[in-house]
Image (spheres, rainbow, N blue to C red):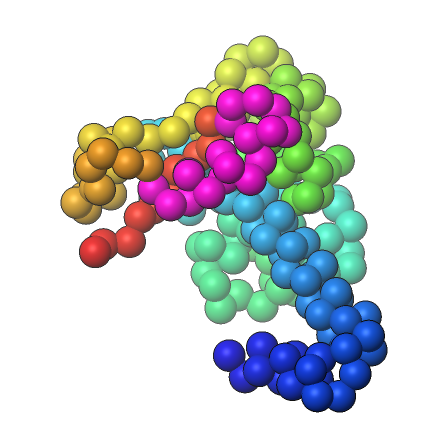
């Protein structure tokens, strides 16, 4: 709250124009970019085991975000150990290839989080399967169309009963979660009706 109070003070008491271009616009653009990227990191939620760190987070290799942003593409490594130093993430990935394969992890290349978000919102699963997904483990025996269908299942909305069974919590009956409702309102126009992945709801 102190940040927002500072922005308000600078815009109303010091100089609105300078505050807009030095503080407010950069802050807004940064927040928007971070939200879009974070959505892409968690957009593919496994329908069988949504709590799995391997199945419900993704890894990007050989992408600019690794070279210029502290190996941000190794997001599964971060989920497995949030305290892992960013320089250790690639080593962990190479040393844990069998665990990633057995865990049916999702590994991509040739795409970054923002474009992954856009491709998922536009439901371009076949494009992702053909150009970006690196099959590992059982995925190597699947055709491109089967891989695309697999990715599609990871954006299927959970029902209230699914939430109760998979997360062991009391679901809110009669309405969608706030995340699903917000997502459909904001990005629904991008590709028509959007079936956004549900995320874990907090207990009331």
Secondary structure mostly seen in the magenta stretch:
helix
Q: Is residue 72 above or below residue 39?
A: below
Quarter-of-image position of residue 135: top right
Q: Measured from the top left, where is residue 156 in percent x and y? A: 42, 26
Seen from this angle, which residue lies furthest front? 12
Q: Measured from the top left, where is residue 189 in percent x and y? A: 60, 29
Which residue occupies the foreground of this view, 130 or 7?
A: 7
Left or right of 203, for residue 15? right
Which residue occupies the foreground of this view, 31 or 38?
A: 31
What is the magenta range? Answer: 177-194
Q: Is residue 103 above or below residue 4?
A: above
- Which quadrant, please, contains the C terminus? bottom left
Quarter-of-image position of residue 25: bottom right
Residue 189 covered by magenta stretch = yes
- Residue 95 seen in render: no
Seen from this angle, which residue lies furthest bottom? 14
Who's the residue at 51% across and 27% down the image? Answer: 194
Left or right of 92, for residue 28? right
Which residue occupies the foreground of this view, 160 or 92?
A: 160
Who's the residue at 58% across and 11% down the image? Answer: 145
- Residue 8 seen in render: yes
Left or right of 163, for residue 36? right
Q: Measured from the top left, where is residue 29 in percent x and y? A: 71, 59
Which residue occupies the foreground of this view, 35 or 41?
A: 35
Who's the residue at 70% across and 38% down the image? Answer: 115
Left or right of 111, for residue 153? left
Who's the residue at 62% across and 64% down the image? Answer: 86
Quarter-of-image position of residue 141: top right
Q: Measured from the top left, where is residue 30 in percent x and y? A: 69, 61
Residue 60 covered by magenta stretch = no
């Amino acid at each position: 709250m102190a940040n927002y109070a500072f922005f308000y003070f600078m815009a109303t008491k010091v100089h609105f124009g300078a505050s807009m271009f030095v503080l407010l616009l950069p802050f807004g653009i940064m927040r928007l970019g971070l939200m879009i990227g974070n959505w892409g990191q968690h957009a593919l939620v496994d329908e069988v085991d949504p709590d799995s760190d391997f199945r419900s987070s993704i890894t990007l290799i050989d992408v600019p975000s690794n070279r210029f942003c502290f190996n941000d593409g190794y997001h599964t490594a971060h989920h497995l150990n949030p305290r892992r130093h960013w320089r250790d993430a690639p080593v962990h990935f190479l040393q844990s290839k069998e665990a990633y394969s057995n865990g049916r992890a999702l590994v991509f290349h040739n795409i970054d989080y923002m474009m992954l978000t856009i491709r998922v919102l536009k439901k371009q699963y076949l494009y992702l399967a053909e150009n970006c997904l690196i099959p590992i483990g059982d995925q190597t025996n699947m055709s491109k169309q089967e891989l695309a269908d697999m990715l599609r299942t990871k954006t299927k909305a959970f029902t209230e009963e699914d939430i109760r069974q998979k997360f062991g919590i009391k679901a809110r009956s009669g309405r969608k979660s706030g995340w699903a409702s917000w997502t459909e309102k904001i990005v629904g126009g991008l590709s028509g009706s959007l079936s956004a992945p549900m995320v874990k709801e907090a207990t009331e």
